[in-house]
């Protein structure tokens, strides 16, 4: 079934390497294709506006563990994750398609739960579920969602268009989703060892919710429009802040400095990190799945945004040829490295 | 993880039953959503034209067996299947996203093969691969594709708009893909029993190709436009002619008569059916995966189409309240029943 010659393991190239290989097979031939692979969403010319298009796939045991992930939350999260990609283009989501593969281990009622969660997210983000596919699976549950959004042509935002001296901004706080997951995993282990033990999660409700029911930051997208700010670049934080910073830096061809003491970290995140003997800064930088927005603005937009409770200024873009640095409280600069997802 | 109350097995409701349950969770709230679940593709108002959107998911061991399905062909077929849905709306495909889940049983070279096949199909159908997702899988390969197409508003065609006395037309021939699959399965069994045996497939190359590398009938869509024919209804034949006829009949609220002696069946299909002791008419009606188009035209368009080598007139729509009948050579009418896919 496979190649007879050379065999390279997927683990050797990783997800980003595989995407580069896929990119090399691609030719764009339609004028309406404005942007293909390489941003949070593809951009299609629809006449007087752009449509943006993003697809994500969630696989049981890779992206979620149903022993602690309620199906209703999973449905909600699947939509939120895609809406977040649409938000990252500064676009407004409008439609989604949902395809699922399910084994007969799932009941009809379980699948209904999943779709009730999807419907809740559709309501929250004002999105219509317009199609998809349902099929059986030999193993677990696979959910594939495609979201479509629209945006005025002059308001589209890419990750590759940050300018020197632009201010780096992040919404909400970081690291909480990762620590929520760690807490859930710990409680699962405790439960497996002793099913009589009650889970001790009441101190970490915010963290749980960040992992189980993340929000796409459409609120911020609407507020930026109200403030008449068009970010100069934007990306959503799905793989971790470090990874996304490097995407902006690399695709914009600039360096950047981010200051660790400016990173927004919730108190629950700090407490959980301490309890688990993890470094909260590392969790904030490499945690992933926060689904916050990372964006750059012109210095001239600083006054409009400086006191916004949901937006934190964490650094700025530097010159082409400069590194991407994490600047410690001591002033020491450490070059950023991305962990990203290493599923393979 | 699942419901604590009633448990209904997926097999009890089947795929169409599950889709009905999903539909009940859906609310449409955006004006740009012209058509949601219930046709070959969703329809979105993009200003001066419509965009159509369709998603399909292909799962290893459910939809394909890699022991006889080359990955390059699989890539091609995955795209063709989606393009066929776009064709069924009388639209022109423009972009696709491809999401895959793969286990580490696959090499990088194997995934490249898959994407080379996808690239071939993109070239054949003039479609751009603009995005998607890549993730790992605990089990086999899952491919999820979303296709986008566009169509002038006055040329969109639904499955629900056939009119009384309209002529039923089908493209190409029927049953070949199903018999191709049966032949491949038989040869696999022979090979498993005795790996020294050479496969005897040379008499059935057309059938193999129909299963392994189906074509979406964009050629017919372009010809219909040239002939200035807008079908009154249309659907692609993925689940089998009977199933698709019932979709047109039910959604248009009319009966129909289809004449078995008019069904286009290739000689190889007839020979293979004989060799496997199968009824060729049953194969043509319930076989599935032909990816031909089934459509209706006004009687006044009959002259434009009657001698077209790739289009066969197989029957006509009858009144509301009439049954959907298969009319035998003897004149006996048998009510149609659909098998469709029973994956669960």
Image (cartoon, coloured by chain):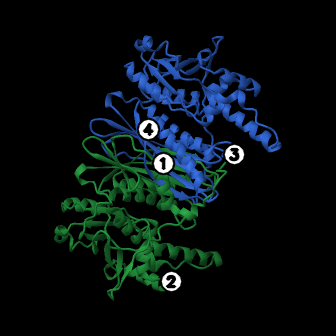
Chain colours: A green, B blue
Residue hosting label 4: B41
Residue hosting label 2: A276
Do tag 3 and tag 4 residues touch (Cβ < 8 Å)? no
Give the mark toward the camera: 2 or 1.
1
SS for tag 1?
loop
Residue B256 seen from this side:
yes
Looking at the picture, does residue B332 appear above or below residue A226?
Answer: above
Looking at the picture, does residue B300 appear above or below residue B137?
Answer: above
- Residue B134 screen position, x and y as percent: 51, 56
- Disc nearer the start of the sequence (2/1): 1
Residue hosting label 3: B67
In three-dimensional space, the C-alpha distance between marks 4 and 1, rounded to whole angstroms, equals 27 Å
SS for tag 2?
loop
Tell me where residue B210 sits by quadrant. top right
In three-dimensional space, the C-alpha distance between marks 4 and 2, rounded to whole angstroms, equals 49 Å
Give the mark toward the camera: 3 or 1.
1
> Residue visible at 66% across and 11% down?
B330
The answer as to whether the residues below labels 4 and 1 share one chain is no
A123 relative to B76 in the view: left or right: left
The answer as to whether the residues below labels 3 and 4 share one chain is yes
In three-dimensional space, the C-alpha distance between marks 3 and 4, rounded to whole angstroms, equals 31 Å
- Disc nearer the start of the sequence (3/4): 4
Residue hosting label 1: A25
Give the mark toward the camera: 4 or 1.
1
């Amino acid at each position: 079934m496979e190649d007879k010659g050379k065999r390279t393991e997927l683990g050797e190239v990783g997800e980003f390497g595989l995407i580069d290989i896929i990119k090399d097979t691609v030719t764009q031939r339609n004028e309406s294709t404005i942007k293909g692979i390489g941003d949070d969403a593809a951009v299609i010319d629809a006449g007087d506006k752009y449509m943006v298009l993003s697809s994500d796939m969630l696989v049981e045991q890779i992206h979620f563990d149903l022993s602690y992930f309620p199906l209703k939350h999973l449905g909600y999260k699947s939509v939120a994750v895609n809406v977040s990609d649409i938000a990252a283009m500064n676009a407004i989501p409008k439609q989604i398609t949902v395809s699922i593969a399910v084994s007969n281990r799932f009941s009809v009622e379980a699948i209904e739960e999943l779709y009730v969660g999807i419907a809740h997210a559709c309501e929250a983000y004002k999105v219509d579920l317009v199609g998809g596919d349902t099929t059986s699976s030999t193993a677990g549950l696979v959910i594939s969602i495609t979201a479509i959004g629209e945006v005025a042509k002059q308001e589209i935002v890419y990750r590759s268009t940050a300018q020197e001296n632009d201010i780096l901004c992040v919404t909400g706080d970081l690291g909480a989703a990762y620590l929520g997951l760690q807490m859930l995993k710990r409680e699962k282990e405790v439960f497996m060892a002793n099913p009589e033990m009650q889970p001790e999660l009441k101190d970490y409700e915010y963290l749980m919710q960040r992992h189980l029911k993340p929000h796409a930051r459409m609120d911020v997208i609407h507020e930026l429009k109200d403030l008449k700010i068009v970010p100069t670049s934007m990306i959503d934080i799905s793989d971790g802040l470090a990874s996304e910073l490097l995407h902006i830096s690399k695709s914009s061809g600039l360096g950047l400095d981010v200051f660790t003491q400016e990173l927004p970290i919730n108190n629950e995140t700090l407490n959980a990190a301490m309890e688990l003997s993890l470094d909260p800064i590392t969790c904030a930088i490499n945690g992933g799945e926060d689904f916050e927005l990372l964006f750059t603005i012109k210095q001239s937009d600083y006054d409009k945004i400086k006191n916004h409770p949901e937006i934190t200024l964490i650094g700025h873009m530097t010159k082409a040829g400069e590194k991407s640095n994490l600047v410690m409280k001591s002033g020491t600069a450490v070059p950023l490295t991305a962990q990203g997802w290493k599923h393979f």
